[in-house]
Image (cartoon, coloured by chain):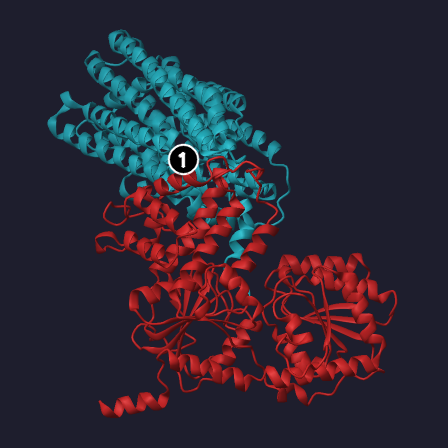
Chain colours: A cyan, B red
């Protein structure tokens, strides 16, 4: 007689909670912020260079096109981006390299389509006809860029990412300034900016394609694979959408308020709020770099040791000791970067009047800049905590926290909108403080029960 | 969650009380083979009784029924030992007992003193406060995690935690599925093995007070023990030297668990039968009480095979192994024996008649071995066939199994007058050479060999294939023995008496009861 048990006896060897290539999606969440900051710098450089030659309205119209393209595409492609990172990591782990190229191309296509579609939705609810095509093209190109950036992150090609963005944005700045000085319109300037982004995309794609050399034999398999991974990682995809929308939602709400202005492009923006908040966001750049370097070195070393010990059949005593080491590394990484971030924030707050003057903002924006800088610091801690949750595969918590920050940012910003201009920025700050504290607590709980969560997840994945 | 009533059958499992609830594991109706065929036969030969069948399977994979349901089968339910766990455990303190209590109850079950009482206690612990937890609560909650850790530290803290964790999930996950399964209503719970089927019968006895009976074919615990010993991936972590060491290994854990499941079943059952006397030794060793033991041999319909012609001497010399192509049948030894024999009998034909799909990896290994030995024109894996069509061309039936109970293949071959060669497992010797009680002695109906002994099989087969007289003499002897001791009519009435003794109502009794009401 054959019992029902032998199947289990035979199958057990392979069912280990594998050390997946999870770090790439965590890093991706962080690294994706860097190019956006580089873009702010490029826009600032263009503004400073051309302010003598252009009307302020023209410059504002150009900026709205770029900002909309980035905002729309970032949120629209977030689910595709995170799935494609995760899919690439899993396919590499499983040795299914024949699907990599097809999946990459499928991701690019889906990313560009979603970016363009998101603008189409926007166009339906507003009148943006003069700049319409420019935004569609910019959104699609930036959509491509996000995907290619995600895959480069999965391959840990940080040098390549830096070179591609530095090179591409230099081209953007050069061409845009050239167009402006030749008397071109804001739409033509936007096309000029898109040329540089296109160069960035090509450089990123080139680096990815040189890694994914396996020829694509079946056009449907990558799409099917994408569907499969989409279902598997739906919480990640939803969470990523919330997290990226959470970065923008306060701006969207302010745009719809009394501060909102319609630029020549037909796109609504709030120059006072946007300028101060974008610059405030720049304060997190140094700590982002520090955080990524910590993740890539001491944390990753402990992270790998923890999972490798499980796979290598360590005793529970050893596994728990490694978990404690990993917990120490996690807390240390958050505290070190948090401390550094708040020192930078303090400098930003103290130097706010000078920054306002240097950036060409109004003196009245000093307070908003200070609030924005403090909010950005907590927002940074929130994002750093989320990246740890991704490392530990706490996808549901990632999603819920993303939704929490998005909701709080929405509610509090609406409240400040009702309270009046003096309160602008406080909604973002309150949301960032609360969500970062919750995220820290969730990380703390996750790391405290890491072994339980690791094995429970493996049990769920084994469908047993 | 756990059950899925097969719509192929009537579905009123919970509502209608059957006379007998048959509890089977890993066989009927999804796997064809000796035990499944026997179950089908049992129900068909008891037309006055009604049956529920609980078929225990390992996972939720779709399965096709290989048997048409008999008219007295009221329902068939699947008990899935390892359904996917839900993502979230309710995990409330009220739904799961305290982890220490849960761990202690499970540890108590594993102890040599653990048995039916320990199982009953575990059931009470799980249902603390009258609240039934979900399977996810029991397998994946924080409480169950604490229990796993406590058990690991108590049993094998020196060993791979990864191995322990999966072993725990496999062993106790299955146990929890059994304990949470909605019991069908029946007057008698009849399990055909210990293991998880035996646990369900024990649970039914504990919860309903109705009798549970066990009619063992092979000794389940022994079969699992063989598989555990053969599992190469299990590493030994405790050096069992001279010094007493209380720690256990993964192999010990699996073995202890199945032994404890068996103890609980033996203690719960009012009657424990087996197919041949030799098995009783093992049952006693595993904790069965002597007064509960009896023997009911398997039977076949001799007339079905008795009319078949015997293979003539002018057809190619043909050996056949009738059985599933799985490791426990040791088909590779049969192939190796054919390789040895072909050197002396070049026109040898060796057939393997049985399903190939139960362990496709093993079937592939067998095909590979045939290729390696260049036996493609000699050994053929024919899959599932109608045995009756092949018997007239088979000169000798071989059974190279590592474990058997009372193989129907030998009885059917014997009924057809075909001499047999079988390994010394289960009732094979008793069938081929006769039991100690056989009077008058009929003589041998073939040869018995050692385990994994291709050369012994080849030598015995050579003697039979080269001598038509010997073949006919042994074939006739075996035919007489099967007619005398293994008639299905006799077996059927023995089971009927057993059911009646334990309270099953015949259809006549049911009608009488109905008219009185």
Q: Chain letter of disc 1? A: A
In the rendered view, tell whether residue B178 sits above or below residue A293. Answer: below
Which image quadrant is residue A408 in?
Answer: top left
Which residue is at the far left? A419
| Count of numbered tags | 1
Give SS at disc 1: helix
Mark yes or no: residue A464 visible.
Answer: no
In percent of width and height, residue A248 lies at 30, 31
Displayed quadrant of residue A63:
top left
Question: Which of A126 and A83 lies nearest the eye of the viewer?
Answer: A83
Q: Quadrant of the N terminus of chain B?
A: bottom left
Residue placed most toward the observer, B317 or B434? B434
Say left or right for B141 vs B468.
left
The reply to whether residue A308 is in sight is: yes
- Residue A61 at x, y percent in the picture: 32, 26
- Indicate left or right for A424 with B276 as reference: left
Left or right: where B213 falls relative to B302: left
Viewer-closest of A293 and A219: A293
Q: Quadrant location of residue B338?
A: bottom right
Which is nearer the eye, A128 or B392?
Answer: B392
Q: Residues within 10 Å of mark 1 (few under 14, many from 20)?
A: many
Residue A221: x and y in percent read: 55, 50
- Give the residue drawn at x 32%, y 23%: A381
Q: Position of residue B27 (x, y in %)?
A: 51, 68
Quadrant into which the C terminus of chain B falls: bottom left
Residue A48 vertical placement versus B405 (above, below): above
Q: Residue at x 42, y 30 (%)?
A: A320
Where is B83 relative to A193, above or below?
below
Residue marked by disc 1: A451
User: Does A170 appear above or below B258?
Assistant: above
């Amino acid at each position: 007689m054959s019992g029902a048990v032998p199947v289990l006896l035979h199958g057990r060897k392979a069912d280990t909670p594998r050390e997946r290539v999870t770090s790439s999606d965590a890093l991706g969440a962080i690294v994706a912020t860097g190019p956006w900051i580089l873009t702010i710098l490029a826009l600032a450089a263009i503004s400073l260079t051309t302010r003598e030659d252009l009307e302020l309205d023209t410059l504002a119209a150009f900026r709205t096109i770029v900002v909309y393209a980035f905002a729309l595409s970032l949120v629209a492609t977030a689910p595709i981006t995170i799935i494609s990172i995760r899919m690439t990591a899993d396919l590499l782990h499983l040795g299914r390299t024949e699907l990599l190229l097809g999946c990459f191309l499928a991701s690019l296509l889906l990313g560009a389509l979603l970016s363009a579609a998101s603008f189409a939705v926007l166009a339906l609810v507003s009148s943006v006809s003069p700049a319409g095509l420019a935004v569609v093209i910019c959104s699609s190109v930036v959509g491509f860029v996000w995907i290619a950036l995600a895959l480069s992150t999965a391959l840990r090609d940080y040098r390549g990412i830096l070179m591609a963005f530095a090179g591409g944005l230099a081209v953007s700045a050069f061409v845009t300034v050239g167009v402006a000085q030749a008397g071109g319109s804001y739409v033509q300037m936007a096309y000029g900016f898109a040329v540089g982004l296109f160069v960035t995309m090509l450089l990123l794609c080139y680096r990815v394609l040189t890694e994914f050399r396996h020829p694509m034999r079946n056009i449907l398999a990558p799409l099917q694979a994408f569907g499969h991974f989409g279902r598997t990682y739906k919480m990640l995809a939803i969470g990523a959408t919330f997290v990226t929308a959470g970065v923008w939602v306060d701006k969207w709400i302010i745009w719809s308020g009394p501060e909102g202005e319609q630029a020549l492009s037909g796109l609504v923006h709030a120059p006072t709020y946007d300028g101060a908040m974008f610059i405030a966001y720049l304060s997190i750049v140094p700590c982002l770099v520090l955080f990524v370097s910590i993740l890539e070195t001491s944390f990753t070393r402990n992270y790998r040791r923890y999972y490798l010990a499980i796979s290598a059949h360590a005793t529970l005593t050893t596994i728990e000791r490694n978990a404690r080491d990993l917990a120490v590394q996690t807390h240390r990484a958050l505290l070190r970067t948090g401390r550094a971030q708040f020192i930078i924030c303090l400098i930003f707050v103290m130097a706010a009047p000078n920054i306002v003057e240097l950036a060409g903002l109004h003196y009245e924006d000093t307070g908003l800049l200070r609030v924005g800088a403090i909010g950005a610091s907590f927002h940074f801690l929130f994002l750093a905590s989320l990246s740890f949750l991704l490392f530990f595969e706490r996808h549901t918590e990632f999603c819920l926290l993303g939704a929490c920050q998005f909701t709080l940012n929405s509610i509090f910003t609406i409240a400040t909108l009702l309270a009046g201009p003096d309160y602008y920025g406080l909604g973002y700050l309150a949301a960032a403080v609360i969500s970062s504290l919750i995220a820290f607590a969730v990380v703390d709980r996750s790391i405290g029960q890491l072994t339980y969560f690791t094995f429970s997840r493996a049990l769920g994945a084994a469908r047993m | 969650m756990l059950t899925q009533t097969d719509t192929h059958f009537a579905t009123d499992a919970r509502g209608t009380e059957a006379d007998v609830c048959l509890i089977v594991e890993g066989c009927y109706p999804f796997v064809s083979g000796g035990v499944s065929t026997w179950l089908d036969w049992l129900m068909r030969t008891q037309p006055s009784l009604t049956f529920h069948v609980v078929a225990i399977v390992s996972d939720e994979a779709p399965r096709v029924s290989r048997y048409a349901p008999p008219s007295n089968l009221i329902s068939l339910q699947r008990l899935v030992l390892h359904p996917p766990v839900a993502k979230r455990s309710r995990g409330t303190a009220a739904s799961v007992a305290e982890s220490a209590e849960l761990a202690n109850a499970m540890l108590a079950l594993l102890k040599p003193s653990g048995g039916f009482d320990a199982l009953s206690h575990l059931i009470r612990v799980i249902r603390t406060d009258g609240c039934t937890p979900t399977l996810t609560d029991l397998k994946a909650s924080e409480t169950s995690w604490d229990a796993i850790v406590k058990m690991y530290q108590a049993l094998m803290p020196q060993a791979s935690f990864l191995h322990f964790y999966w072993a725990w999930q496999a062993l106790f996950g299955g146990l929890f599925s059994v304990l949470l399964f909605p019991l069908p209503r029946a007057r008698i719970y009849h399990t055909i093995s210990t293991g998880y089927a035996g646990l369900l019968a024990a649970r039914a006895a504990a919860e309903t007070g109705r009798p549970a009976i066990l009619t063992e074919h092979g000794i389940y615990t022994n079969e699992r023990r063989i598989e555990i010993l053969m599992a190469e991936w299990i590493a030994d972590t405790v050096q069992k030297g001279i010094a007493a060491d209380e720690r256990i290994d993964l192999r010990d854990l699996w073995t202890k668990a199945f032994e404890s499941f068996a103890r609980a079943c033996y203690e719960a059952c009012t009657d424990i039968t087996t197919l041949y006397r030799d098995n009783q030794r093992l049952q006693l060793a595993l904790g069965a009480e002597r007064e509960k033991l009896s023997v009911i041999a398997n039977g076949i319909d001799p007339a079905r095979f008795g009319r078949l012609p015997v293979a003539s001497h002018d057809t190619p010399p043909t050996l056949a192994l009738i059985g599933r192509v799985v490791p426990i049948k040791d088909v590779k030894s049969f192939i190796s024996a054919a390789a040895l024999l072909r050197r002396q009998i070049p026109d040898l034909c060796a057939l393997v008649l049985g399903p190939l799909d139960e362990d496709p990896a093993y079937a592939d290994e067998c095909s590979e071995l045939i290729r390696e030995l260049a036996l493609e024109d000699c050994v053929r894996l024919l899959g599932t066939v109608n045995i009756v069509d092949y018997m007239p061309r088979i000169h000798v039936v071989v059974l190279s199994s590592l474990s058997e109970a009372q193989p129907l293949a030998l009885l059917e071959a014997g009924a057809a007058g075909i001499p047999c060669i079988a390994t010394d497992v289960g009732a094979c010797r008793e069938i081929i050479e006769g039991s100690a009680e056989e009077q008058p002695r009929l003589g041998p109906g073939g040869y018995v060999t050692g385990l994994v002994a291709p050369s012994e099989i080849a030598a015995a087969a050579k003697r039979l294939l080269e001598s038509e007289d010997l073949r006919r003499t042994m074939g006739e002897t075996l035919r007489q023995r099967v007619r005398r001791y293994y008639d299905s009519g006799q077996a059927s009435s023995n089971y009927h008496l057993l059911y009646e003794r334990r309270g099953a109502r015949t259809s006549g009794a049911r009608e009488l009861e109905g008219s009185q009401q």
